[in-house]
Image (spheres, rainbow, N blue to C red):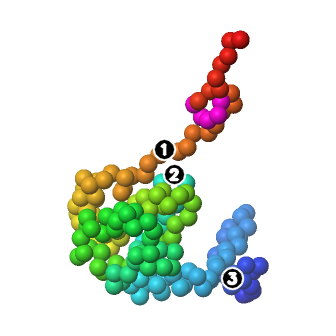
């Protein structure tokens, strides 16, 4: 028999095998879903993509790296719109270090939120570097990925490894986390 479950999936009951009379036959169900079929079709059609993230303080950037023609966008806008201009160079660093031959066949879609603009830029550059490495490991080969990783680590370790420092919470008895109110003896 076939019926629709509460979630909209088609549930079909499989025929059960005859068991000994002491044990009852278990009921088996399979779920046929369109999203799983679509994912299998995408994998067969050659959509090669990876998703990575970068963090700095409270800023989180997510990079979707896929095969393409070298297009880079940030929150749906071109990457050239990053302000201030001095920090835009920091976002370009992974591209400049890895070279044009690595990044010209990749499309990178970036999303960033939280933190200030400096933290967002550092989170972006980490997401880009980690995304290119993950893409290379998954769809190229491990040796190339190791070469790229050593190049990035030699330039700046924060391109790969996140900075664990966070803002320390304020305590009572003072105006900040460590400073105390002035003590008076008279």
- Expressed as whole percent of the image width and height from the top left, the position of residue 152 reads 28, 58
Q: Which residues are magenta?
A: 174-178
Secondary structure type for disc 3:
loop
Q: Residues within 10 Å of mark 2 (few under 14, many from 20)?
A: some
The Cα–Cα distance between marks 3 and 1, rounded to whole angstroms, is 46 Å
Q: Looking at the image, is 14 positioned above or below residue 185?
A: below
Q: Residues within 10 Å of mark 3 (few under 14, many from 20)?
A: some
Q: Which residue is mark 1?
A: 165
Front residue of this view, candidates 34 and 175: 175
Asked if the residue under mark 1 is in contact with the one under mark 2, i.e. CB atoms within 8 Å, the reply is yes
| Mark 3 / mark 1, whichever is N-terminal | 3
Instruction: Confirm whether residue 111 shows in the render.
Output: yes
Secondary structure type for disc 1:
loop
- Quadrant of the rendered structure where residue 132 is? bottom left
Front residue of this view, candidates 108 and 74: 74
x 40%, y 76%: residue = 80
x 73%, y 79%: residue = 7
Front residue of this view, candidates 41 and 181: 181
- Expressed as whole percent of the image width and height from the top left, the position of residue 17 reads 64, 76
Disc marking residue 57? 2
The Cα–Cα distance between marks 2 and 3, rounded to whole angstroms, is 42 Å
The Cα–Cα distance between marks 2 and 1, rounded to whole angstroms, is 7 Å
Q: Residues within 10 Å of mark 1 (few under 14, many from 20)?
A: few
Q: Quadrant of the N terminus?
A: bottom right
Dominant SS of magenta comes to loop
x 51%, y 70%: residue = 111
- Quadrant of the rendered structure where residue 71 is? bottom left
Comparing labels 2 and 3, the label whose residue is closer to the camera: 2
Q: Which residue is mark 3?
A: 9
């Amino acid at each position: 028999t076939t019926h629709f479950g509460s979630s909209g999936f088609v549930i079909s009951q499989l025929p059960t095998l005859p068991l000994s009379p002491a044990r009852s036959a278990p009921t088996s169900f399979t779920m046929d879903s369109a999203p799983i079929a679509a994912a299998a079709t995408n994998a067969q059609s050659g959509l090669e993509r990876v998703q990575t993230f970068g963090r700095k303080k409270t800023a989180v950037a997510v990079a979707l790296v896929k095969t393409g023609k070298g297009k880079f966008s940030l929150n749906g806008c071109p990457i050239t719109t990053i302000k201030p201009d001095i920090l835009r160079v920091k976002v370009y660093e992974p591209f400049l270090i890895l070279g044009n031959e690595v990044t010209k066949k990749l499309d990178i879609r970036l999303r960033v939120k939280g933190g200030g603009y400096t933290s967002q830029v550092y989170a972006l550059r980490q997401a880009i570097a980690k995304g290119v490495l993950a893409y290379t490991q998954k769809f190229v080969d491990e040796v190339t990925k190791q070469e790229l990783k050593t190049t990035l680590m030699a330039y700046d370790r924060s391109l790969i490894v996140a900075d664990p420092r966070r803002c320390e919470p304020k305590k009572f008895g003072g105006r900040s986390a460590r400073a105390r109110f002035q003590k008076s003896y008279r």
